[in-house]
Amino acid sequence: MKKHSNAKIIRSQILDEYYSNVYQNYLFSKDAQGLGTVFFENSIEKFWNNDSPSKVLEIGGGSGEHLKYLKYVPKESYVSFDLRPQFTDAHVGILSSEFLSKLRFVTGNAESLPFEEFEFDRVFMTCVLHHVDDVLSVLLESRRVSCKGAELVFAFPTDPGLLNQLVKKIISYPKLRKLSKVRPELFYALDHRNHVGSILEQIRYVFKDDKLTFHYSPFKLRSWNLNLFIVAKVTKS
């Protein structure tokens, strides 16, 4: 039992160091990685058909990194939900007073969302499903809190696809080595615990009775080995 506890402590220390000291500098830098992040965040907003959502839930909202890319401001509320409390003014200070009055940060585990059934008409997450302990629970919870006709978007990298691994070796790993003493390979080994193929199959199962489409990028080929990320778009029946 003691060995198991030590493993949890070590894993937590490594990931906390990454999210506290490396995450922002890595993803939002002014280089190829930063440009890729901006492209990724902007692309999410192209999948919405409803331009006037009432209640929006972002799972894995962090400290509000996606907020400045929003195309539509919800009529009632916007909940940014995350496992780690990371609120800062860096991403929130630029928002209008109207939006701020609707914005709420909530901390918790996505495997058991603290919201009512059918509460939201838009639910989305970016780069979350690779990290969670139980993908199936997160997907089921996302569907549970979505109302009939709600739009859901799940965006995730194609790790460990061939193109994904190539880009990591050429761009991501060299940059991460400059930002932290911990090997980047270890970061991903500990934090990207779920295989893209497994994620895809579980999405197909949970949303089998809904309208579901997959969008591959940047090359549109229906192959996770030959693309960098995938967006699953759902309209709940």
Image (cartoon, helix red, strand yellow):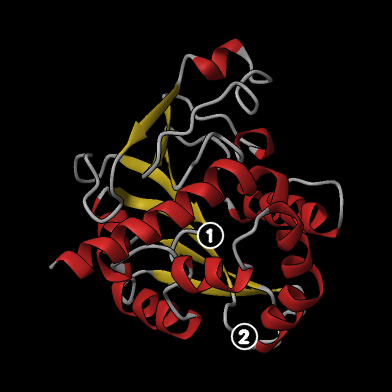
In the foreground, 88 or 65: 88
Tag 1 or tag 2, which sits nearer the N-term?
1
The amino acid type found where label 2 is placed reads Gly
In this rendering, position of residue 152 left or right of residue 98: left
Label ID, residue 161: 2
In the picture shown, does residue 92 fall above or below 80? above
Rendered residue at 36%/63% (across/down): 132
Q: According to the image, label 1 marks what residue?
A: 127
The amino acid type found where label 1 is placed reads Cys
In the foreground, 206 or 156: 156
In this rendering, position of residue 227 left or right of residue 203: right
Rendered residue at 40%/42% (across/down): 82
In the picture shown, does residue 84 fall above or below 127? above
Q: Residue furthest left?
A: 1
The N terminus sits in image quarter: bottom left
In the foreground, 219 or 135: 135
Q: Residue furthest top?
A: 97
- Rate crowding at label 1 as few (under 14), some (14 to 19) or many (20 or more) other CA atoms within 10 Å: some
Rendered residue at 42%/73% (across/down): 193
Q: Quadrant of residue 180?
A: bottom right
In the foreground, 171 or 76: 171
